[in-house]
Amino acid sequence: MKSSVLTRYRVMAYVTAVMLLILCACMVAKYGFGTGEGLTLVVSQVHGVLYIIYLIFAFDLGSKAKWPFGKLLWLLVSGTIPTAAFFVERKVAREVQPLITDGSPVAARA
C-alpha cells in the first residue's frame, strides 16, 4: 500500500472531525440560542460533502488493508460521532503503518 492512501485518509479524518465539531457548535447556537441558522445550513452542507470524500478515502484504505466488514464499518461511522475520528485515525495509522511500502523495488538478498 502506498503512503498516500494513509495520508489522504488522515487528512480527511481530521478535516471531517473538525467540521463535525463546528457543526455541533452551530447546532447548539441555532437550537439553544436561536441564532446562526444560515451558518448552520452552510456548515452542514460543507460537512456533508467532506464526509462523502472521507467515506471514499476510508473505504479505499480499508479495502487495501483487507479489513473485515465490521472494522471497515466502524471506520466509516467514526466520521459521524464527534471526536471519534481523532481516536480512530490514530489507531488506524498505527495499524496501517507496517503495510506501507515506498514503491521502490526491494532488492533480493542472497
Image: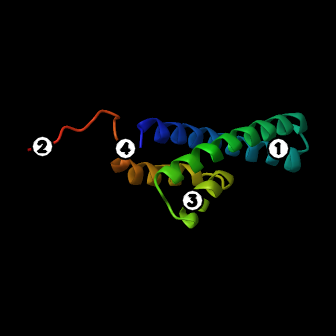
- Which residue is label 3 attached to? 72
Residue 88 image offset from top left, x and y in percent: 52, 54
Residue 109 image offset from top left, x and y in percent: 12, 43
CA gap between label 3 and label 2 equals 36 Å
> Which of the two labelled residues, at mark 1 and mark 2, occupies the earlier sequence position?
1
What is the quadrant of residue 40 in the picture? top right
Q: How many marks?
A: 4
CA gap between label 1 and label 4 equals 43 Å
Q: Nearer the viewer, mark 1 or mark 4?
A: 4
Tell me the number on the disc at residue 29: 1
Q: Secondary structure at mark 1?
A: helix
> Neighbour class for label 2 at 10 Å: few (<14), some, many (≥20)?
few
Q: Nearer the viewer, residue 109 or 6?
A: 109
Q: Nearer the viewer, mark 3 or mark 2?
A: 2
Q: Nearer the viewer, mark 1 or mark 3?
A: 3
- Which residue is label 2 attached to? 109
> Which of the two labelled residues, at mark 1 and mark 3, occupies the earlier sequence position?
1
> Neighbour class for label 4 at 10 Å: few (<14), some, many (≥20)?
some
Q: Secondary structure at mark 3?
A: helix
CA gap between label 1 and label 2 equals 63 Å
> Which of the two labelled residues, at mark 1 and mark 4, occupies the earlier sequence position?
1
Q: Amino acid at mark 2?
A: Arg
Q: Amino acid at mark 4?
A: Ile
Q: Nearer the viewer, residue 75 or 5?
A: 5
> Which of the two labelled residues, at mark 3 and mark 2, occupies the earlier sequence position?
3
At horizontal 48% and vertical 50% (from top left) the residue drawn is: 64
> Neighbour class for label 3 at 10 Å: few (<14), some, many (≥20)?
some
Q: Is residue 7 above or below residue 98?
A: above
Tell me the number on the disc at residue 100: 4
